Image (cartoon, rainbow, N blue to C red):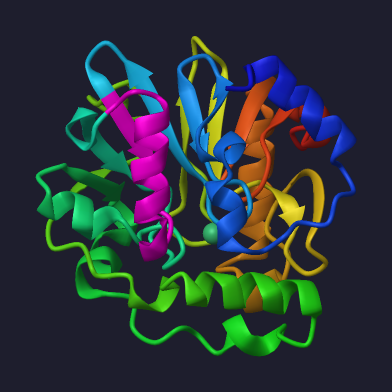
Amino acid sequence: MATAQETLKGIVTQRNMRIPWNIESQLREEQVATEVADGVYQLCSTMTNIYLIEDDDGLTLVDAGVPAQMELLEAGLECIGAEMTDIKAVILTHVDPDHIGLAEPLRKAGIPVWVPEEGYETALNGLGKPPLALFFFMWRPAYARFIRALMQAGMTDAEPIAEAHTFTDGQVLDVPGHPEVIATPGHRKEHCSFWLPERRILFSGDALITMDIMSGKAVAPEPVRGGNLFNYDKGQQMESARKLGTLGHVTLLPGHVQPWEGDLGARYPSAE
Ligand SMILES: [Zn+2]
C-alpha cells in the first residue's frame, strides 16, 4: 500500500496527466485502497472518490459514489482488513447522483446515512431525471467520457435514501473520526465539506476538485467548471473556496481525482 507521502509526491508528477475513465482501472490493486493520509483511505481516483476514515470506533464512509462502486468498496475493505460491519456511518458532502450511489444499499444493511440538511428533501424524494445541463457539454470529448463512464456505472439508477440524519454548518459529527461540517454551498446549495482539524484533512467534495471536468486534465484545487449551467451558483462557489482558504495548509481530499497538499490560503485568499 502506498504511504501518504508517496501518494502526494505522485500528484506533482501527474499534474498534466490524461485521466483514464474506465472503471476497470479502479480495480487495479494500487488504486483499490490508498492510504492518502493518516488513517484515511481513498477508494478510486478516476470516477467519484469514496473515502474511509478510520478510528478506534470503526470507519466512516465519506461520499457514496455510484452503484457499480459496491464492488470497489468490497475490494477496498478487504484490502485494509476491514468488513462492511466496521462502517458505522455514511456521510455525504451533497446529494448529486454521482455521490449517493451506495448510500441506500448501505442504509438497508443497517448503516446510518447523514446528509446536509438542505439536501434532505432531495435525498429522500429522489433526484428525478438528470438535468439537461448535464448534456450541454457533451461535445467536449473528455467531459463526454466522464459522464458516460458515470452513467455506465449506474449514476442515474442511484436509489433515493429512505431515512437519513441531517447536519448543518459547524456541527461536529458523532461518527468515527468526528469530522467537523463546513457549509460550502455553490456547486449545490446543500454542499458541505468535512474537516479533521487535528490531522488537517479536508474532504472538499465538489466544492474544490483537482480536475478540469471539461478537458479531463488534473489541476490544482478549483471549483467545478461550467458556471451556473453546471453549478447552483458560481458566486457562492468562489465564496466557499475563500472560506476553505482560511484553513491554510491542508491535505485536500476532493470528490474527484487526486488528493492535493498545500496552502489553500495562498490559492484562495480572503477578500480584503
Ligand atoms: Zn461529483
- Position of residue 227 relative to residue 199, above or below, is below
Query: Would you say residue 182 is visible in this rendering?
Result: no
User: Is residue 203 or residue 44 the one in the foreground?
Assistant: 44
Percent position of residue 19, x then y = 76, 56
> What quarter of the picture does the C terminus occupy?
top right
Relative placement, left or right, of 120 versus 222 is left
> What quarter of the picture does the N terminus occupy?
top right
Residue at the (50%, 76%) spot, across then down: 152
Magenta highlight on residue 111 = no
Percent position of residue 188, x then y = 49, 62
Query: Would you say residue 99 is visible in this rendering?
Result: yes
Relative placement, left or right, of 250 versus 19 is left
Residue at the (28%, 52%) spot, across then down: 117
User: Is residue 267 or residue 131 the one in the foreground?
Assistant: 131
Relative placement, left or right, of 194 versus 133 is left
User: Is residue 110 or residue 120 the one in the foreground?
Assistant: 110
Percent position of residue 190, x then y = 41, 56
- Position of residue 203 relative to residue 66, above or below, is above
What's drawn in magenta, residue-wise? 59-82
Percent position of residue 17, x then y = 85, 50
Q: Quadrant of ligand 1?
A: bottom right
Residue 129: quarter of image: bottom left
Relative placement, left or right, of 137 versus 42 is right
Residue at the (73%, 25%) spot, across then down: 8
